[in-house]
Amino acid sequence: MTIAANIGDITISNFDVTFPDSLVGINVSKAIDNSFLFYFLQTRKHHLNSIATESAQKNINLEVLNPYKIILPPLDEQKRIAAVLITLDEKIAKETEVSKKLTAMKKGLMHDLLTGAVRTTEK
């Protein structure tokens, strides 16, 4: 999780990593589903950003993060919640890709029409 500048940006790593001082790693116990924690912390980004101190750039320290409360349903419920959110994220990613392709197609068609490369006929 980022703790400087872009407070609360988060990702999941499936391998060992080393962090600069602007990031913190969270070792998750077996009682917490990684994906559930990821989505929960995403919902708290605005709050974390609001409690960050600011000088040259916003910063949040471990004294603020360590006691941070996390709503923790039973593990099986965490997994069900995370599975639904992962499915939705995948659908959003697919729909975003379709939207980008359609936007590019529209742009190309508009270009063809406006430059006269394609003519329309009157009926």
Image (cartoon, grey):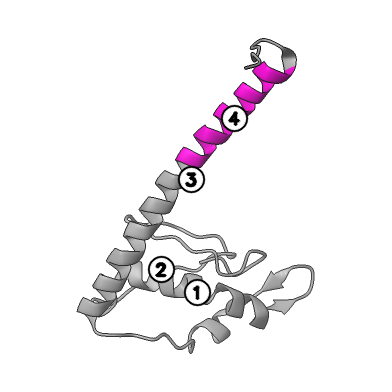
Q: Earlier in the sequence, mark 3 or mark 1?
A: 1
Q: Earlier in the sequence, mark 1 or mark 4?
A: 1
Point out which mark residue 57 bears: none
Q: Residue under circle 3?
A: 96
Q: Earlier in the sequence, mark 3 or mark 2?
A: 2
The amino acid beneath tag 2 is Phe
Contact flag, marks 1 and 4 (Cβ < 8 Å): no
Provide the secondary structure element on which disc 1 rests.
Answer: helix
Q: Residue under circle 2?
A: 38
**Quarter of the image that includes the C terminus:** top right
As drawn, 92 above or below 106: below
Q: Residue under circle 4?
A: 106
The amino acid beneath tag 3 is Thr
The label nearer to you, 3 versus 2, is 3
Q: Earlier in the sequence, mark 4 or mark 2?
A: 2
- In space, the residues marked 4 and 2 are separated at their CA atoms by 36 Å
Q: Which residues are magenta?
A: 98-114
Q: Residues within 10 Å of mark 3 (few under 14, many from 20)?
A: few
Q: Residue at x 57, y 85 (%)?
A: 64
Horizontal side of 111 relative to 69 (left or right) equals right
Q: Residue under circle 1?
A: 43
The amino acid beneath tag 4 is Lys
- Percent across and percent down for residue 1 are 50, 67
Q: Residue at x 31, y 65 (%)?
A: 84
- In space, the residues marked 1 and 4 are separated at their CA atoms by 35 Å
- Percent across and percent down for residue 38 are 41, 68
The label nearer to you, 3 versus 1, is 3
The answer to if 101 sits in the magenta stretch is: yes
The amino acid beneath tag 1 is Thr
Q: Residue at x 54, y 80 (%)?
A: 62
Q: Earlier in the sequence, mark 4 or mark 3?
A: 3
Contact flag, marks 4 and 2 (Cβ < 8 Å): no
